[in-house]
Image (cartoon, rainbow, N blue to C red):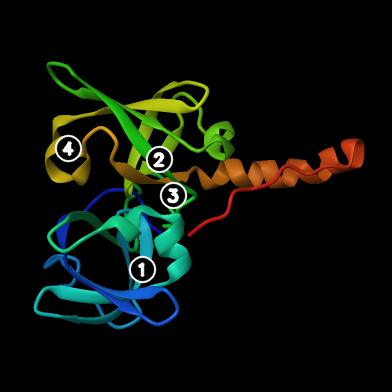
Amino acid sequence: MFTGIVEELGEIVRVTATADDSALVAVRGPLVTSDARHGDSIAVNGVCLTVVDAADGIFTADVMGETLRRSALGALRPGDPVNLERAAALGSRLGGHLVQGHVDGVGELISREPAEQWETVRFRLPAALARYVVEKGSITIDGVSLTVAEVGADEFAVGLIPTTLKLTTLGAKGVGDPVNLEVDVVAKYVERLLGARLTDASGATPSTPGVA
């Protein structure tokens, strides 16, 4: 479990293809590897990965083909910056919101509107996720916990403060760039629970999007 508060801007060192359409990814992140051990969880652009090895400020993780296909990790190349966060510790402050590190879908940055103190950034999202995104609700974009400012039929906007622009990958994203999206898990659970009641009335249960 994570909070969506990025600890460090890391860098992809190498991506090595392995069997079964998977890959071994090496990521540079001196802070998040300072206490990392085999089996620990680190979110890379919002995707929960398991540490295979960590040494000299670099950790490696196996990435399944399913994750490469259903998240934007498959598009990463050596030298690309990535948002990094270690798993939350019990008793720590919850600065963002509850983030699982399970990507629900890939969105696309469609516009940036600079202002004096912040920047409004708009994203297109998959139709299956639109019902989980509400104004003033929480959403995770490339591992960053953000508050939804506006909602459209197939898009939404967030406001990025200078700190977020400077310390995460979102400051350098351009129009057309893909981003990992994770909607609020509470919304999905509520839908699932209500779906059982709706089934009794209509015989059809709403589907829940898959995760990476």
| 28 relative to 24, above or below | above
Using a 10 Å C-alpha cutoff, classify the residue at mark 3 as few (fewer than 14 neighbours), some (14 to 19) or many (20 or more): some
Q: x, y percentage for residue 210?
A: 57, 54
Q: Of callouts 2 and 4, which one flags the residue occurring earlier in the amino acid sequence?
A: 2
Residue at mark 2 to residue at mark 4: CA–CA distance: 16 Å
Using a 10 Å C-alpha cutoff, classify the residue at mark 4 as few (fewer than 14 neighbours), some (14 to 19) or many (20 or more): some
Report the quarter where the N terminus lies.
bottom left
Residue at mark 3 to residue at mark 4: CA–CA distance: 23 Å
Of residues 128 and 91, the one drawn nearer to the viewer in this rendering? 128
Q: Do the residues labelled 2 and 3 touch (CB within 8 Å)?
A: no
- Using residue 153 as the reference point, say whether residue 65 is left or right of it: left
Residue at mark 1 to residue at mark 3: CA–CA distance: 17 Å
Element type at marker 4?
helix
Q: Is residue 178 shown to the viewer in this render?
A: yes
| 23 relative to 86, above or below | below
Element type at marker 2?
strand
- Using residue 197 as the reference point, say whether residue 10 is left or right of it: left
Residue at mark 1 to residue at mark 2: CA–CA distance: 20 Å
Look at label 3 and name its amino acid.
Answer: Leu
Q: x, y percentage for residue 139?
A: 42, 39
Element type at marker 3?
loop
Look at label 4 and name its amino acid.
Answer: Gly
Q: Is residue 35 shown to the viewer in this render?
A: no
Of residues 164 and 180, the one drawn nearer to the viewer in this rendering? 180
Q: Mark 2 points at which residue?
A: 107
Give residue 171's mark.
4
Q: Are marks 1 and 3 in contact (CB under 8 Å)?
A: no
Q: Name the residue under label 3.
A: 98
Q: x, y percentage for residue 9?
A: 15, 54
The residue at 14%/65% (across/down) is 31
Q: Are marks 3 and 4 in contact (CB under 8 Å)?
A: no
Badge nearest the viewer, 2 or 3: 2
